[in-house]
Image (cartoon, rainbow, N blue to C red):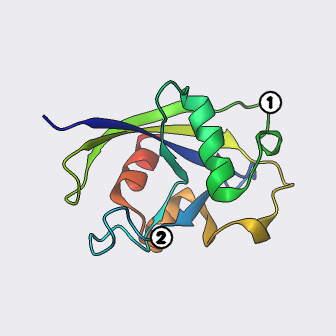
Amino acid sequence: MNGIIPVVAAIIGDGSKYGRVLITKRGICECGGGCGLEDRYEFPGGKVDVGETLENALLREIKEELDINLEDIDSQYPPRVVHAQINKYDHSPDYYLVIFMECFARETIDQSKLPEHAWVELDTIENYNPLPGSVKALRSL
């Protein structure tokens, strides 16, 4: 039987009237490349460690990937689950339970520290060659 790996993904809004969200460009895939997932845009996030809450996993992943600390996330709007889906990729025998959590960034985020990224309006995300799961999650909102 294949495993189910829990993953969190952050839908980080900029709080603007335009409803922009942060997407980051994926680097080399765990499979070593050639699977079609590398160099595509996605919501930042990663695997949930054993015993870790979804919120703690999300905040840890945001720190690791984006160098954004907890205090950089707007505490008026703590992360909340907005969508979940199962993804299956050809390069892995496992299934990924991706839990999308919405949060809002404060304007104090240092954009120069972010990996290759874009703040995009929801209706333009497909112009960035995103992973199919990211588009599916947005359509469910």
**Residue 45 visible to the viewer:** yes
Q: Are marks 2 and 1 in contact (CB under 8 Å)?
A: no
Say which residue appears at 62% left-offset and 32% top-offset.
56
Q: Please give the label number shown on residue 102.
A: none
Q: Quadrant of the N terminus?
A: top left
Q: Quadrant of residue 28?
A: bottom left
Q: Residue at x 48, y 36 (%)?
A: 48
Residue type at numbered disc 1: Gln
Across and down, in percent, residue 100 comes to 49, 39
Q: Residue furthest right?
A: 108
Mark positioned earlier in the residue sequence (2 or 1): 2
Return the residue at label 2. Answer: 27
Dividing the picture into quarters, in which one does residue 140 lie? top left
Callout 2 crowding tier (Cα within 10 Å): few <14, some 14–19, many ≥20:
some
Residue topped by disc 1: 76
Q: Residue at x 39, y 71 (%)?
A: 38
Q: Amino acid at mark 2?
A: Gly
**122 sits to left or right of 40:** right
Q: Position of residue 77 (x, y in %)?
A: 73, 31
